[in-house]
């Protein structure tokens, strides 16, 4: 088993497709396919996407709680037989994320419920299990937020253990969690999660130069590859050899289709790492092509390999500075 | 069809130095009746089931009785559980565990389940590390699928 994904705060993702969604109105949904319940949380998404992409098996770890937690593990078990589950079932209820997708007006409305509180014995048990698993894998994907009770330096401890065992660490996080992990034990591949923040490493980013400074700062802590999404149609790529800007050549991106693009990005980079000897820039480009291919689908799902290949041609690469 | 085709890839496990109380709580949250006990390389050291704990808190002769109405005093049960709840599960787990490999046939797995009166078996890789579980209903489901395929 090559891949381990960490989702400290998994969720049950419920997507409801409602055209002309309006507040203060009763909406009836007649087709069952427009009410989707899927296991979620960024690490779990990567596991599911890898499984869909070419059946890459992975181990998924984290905490699940209560009734919602049991639905998450049951759905994973049913739909993704090559994802090995290694979750600790704790007191409390796992999160539930509700998204209302309106394809007509291109709106996405999201409601995220809080997760359970992790107690110390659960965290200790997790750490011990993590140590036994990480010695068997090649890549550790650490992604998303942490629930209450999990200290902000946890990701850096996980990153350190993974590296000690010869794993490449892929991190997608935001805020203090990102800053702490980068500073204390910088993962090899870092993708700041920009979905609900305009800060990277504690600093606000607005201009291209501010973004470039932030990317270079993460590289200076030892990352091999940093990928930052920039104004929708671009991605900024940083390695020790320089910085690049990748741009979508043609076509408009549909904002209501952005769900899961970041996870498709990471899953594609992991797949590329396991199956090719591409350069870091090519790997990032492959990730972006997957994210781009994902935007042609409304739901959170992995685009097929042929779509990713096709979208590679729709990306323009320019070197910065 | 092989064990690997129908197994449940869940490697939830417990370590031998965890307490009886921890085991009870994990089982309750996970709706499990028992858990494999592993070392720090995921090799199976034993298996602890809820029966192992029940047998430890009630006098052994109760197993021979048809009804629990003979229990003289429920406080006795409370007291006993209080005494053992902080003890390591290694004291109560079954140390000899029968496991199967993913490449084993369903027939082999069912034979072991029937002969040893187990409800589930641990599945291990070539280095004896836990990779999942297989139980009676999954085997029956596998056999049903084989039947369907034959009839097609």
Image (cartoon, helix red, strand yellow):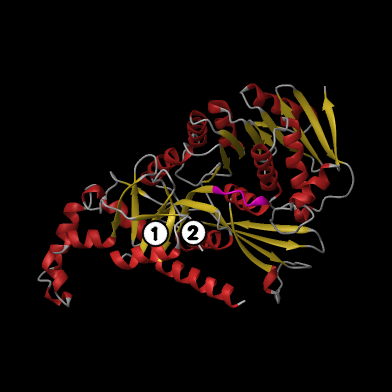
Q: Mark 2 points at which residue?
A: A69
Locate residue A201: give its quadrant: top right
Locate residue A128: give its quadrant: top left
SS category of the residue bearing label 1:
helix
> How many marks on residues?
2
Position of A75 with respect to B37 (left or right) is: right
B136, above or below B102, in the image:
below
Front in this rendered view, residue B107 or B118: B107
Point 70% across, 33% down: residue: A277
Q: Name the residue under label 1.
A: B29
Position of A305 with respect to B78 (left or right) is: right
Q: Mark 1 lies on which chain?
A: B
From the image, which quarter does the C terminus of chain A lie in?
top right
Residue A276 in the image: x percent, y percent?
Answer: 69, 36
Q: Residue furthest left?
A: B72
Inter-mark Cα distance, 1 to 2: 9 Å
Q: Mark 2 lies on which chain?
A: A
Position of A93 with respect to B83 (left or right) is: right
Residue A209 in the image: x percent, y percent?
Answer: 78, 27
Residue A35 in the image: x percent, y percent?
Answer: 66, 68
What's drawn in magenta, residue-wise?
Answer: A54-58
Front in this rendered view, residue A319 or A90: A319
SS category of the residue bearing label 2:
helix
């Amino acid at each position: 088993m090559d891949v381990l994904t960490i989702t400290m705060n998994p969720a049950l993702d419920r997507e409801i497709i409602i055209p002309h969604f309006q507040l203060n109105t009763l909406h009836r949904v007649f087709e069952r396919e427009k009410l989707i319940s899927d296991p979620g949380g960024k690490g779990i998404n990567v596991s599911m996407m890898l499984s869909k992409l070419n059946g890459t098996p992975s181990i998924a770890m984290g905490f699940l709680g209560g009734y919602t937690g049991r639905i998450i593990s049951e759905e994973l078990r049913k739909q993704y037989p090559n994802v090995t589950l290694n979750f600790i079932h704790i007191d409390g209820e796992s999160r539930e994320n509700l998204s209302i997708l309106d394809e007509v007006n291109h709106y996405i409305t999201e409601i995220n419920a809080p997760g359970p509180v992790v107690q110390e014995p659960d965290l200790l048990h997790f750490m011990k299990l993590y140590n036994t698993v990480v010695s068997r894998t090649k890549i550790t994907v650490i992604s998303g937020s942490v629930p209450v009770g999990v200290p902000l330096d946890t990701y850096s401890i996980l990153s350190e253990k993974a590296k000690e065992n010869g794993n490449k660490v892929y991190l997608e996080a935001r805020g203090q969690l990102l800053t702490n992990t980068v500073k204390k034990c910088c993962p090899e591949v870092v993708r700041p999660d920009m979905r609900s923040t305009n800060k990277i490493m504690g600093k606000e980013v607005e201009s291209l130069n501010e973004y470039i400074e932030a990317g270079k700062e993460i590289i200076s802590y030892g990352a091999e590859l940093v990928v930052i999404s920039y104004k929708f149609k671009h991605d900024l790529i940083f390695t020790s050899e320089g910085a690049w800007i990748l741009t979508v050549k043609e076509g408009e991106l549909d904002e209501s289709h952005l769900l899961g693009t970041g996870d498709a990005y990471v899953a594609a980079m992991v797949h590329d790492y396991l199956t090719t000897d591409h350069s870091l820039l090519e790997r990032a480009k492959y990730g972006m092509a997957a994210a781009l291919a994902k935007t042609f689908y409304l739901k959170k799902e992995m685009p097929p390999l042929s779509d990713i290949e096709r979208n590679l041609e729709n990306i323009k690469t320019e070197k910065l500075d | 069809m092989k064990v690997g085709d129908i197994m449940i890839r869940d490697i939830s496990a417990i370590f031998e130095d965890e307490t009886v109380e921890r085991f009870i709580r994990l089982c309750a949250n996970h709706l499990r009746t028992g858990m494999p006990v592993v070392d720090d390389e995921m090799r199976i050291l034993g298996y602890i089931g809820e029966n192992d704990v029940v047998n430890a808190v009630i006098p052994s002769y109760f197993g021979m009785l048809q009804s629990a109405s003979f229990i003289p005093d429920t406080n006795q049960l409370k007291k006993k559980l209080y005494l053992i709840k902080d003890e390591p599960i290694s004291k109560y787990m079954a140390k000899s565990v029968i496991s199967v490999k993913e490449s084993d046939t369903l027939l082999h797995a069912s034979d072991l389940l029937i002969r040893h009166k187990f409800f589930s078996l641990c599945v291990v890789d070539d280095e004896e590390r836990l990779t999942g579980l297989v139980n009676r209903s999954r085997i029956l489901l596998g056999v049903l699928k084989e039947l369907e395929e034959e009839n097609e």
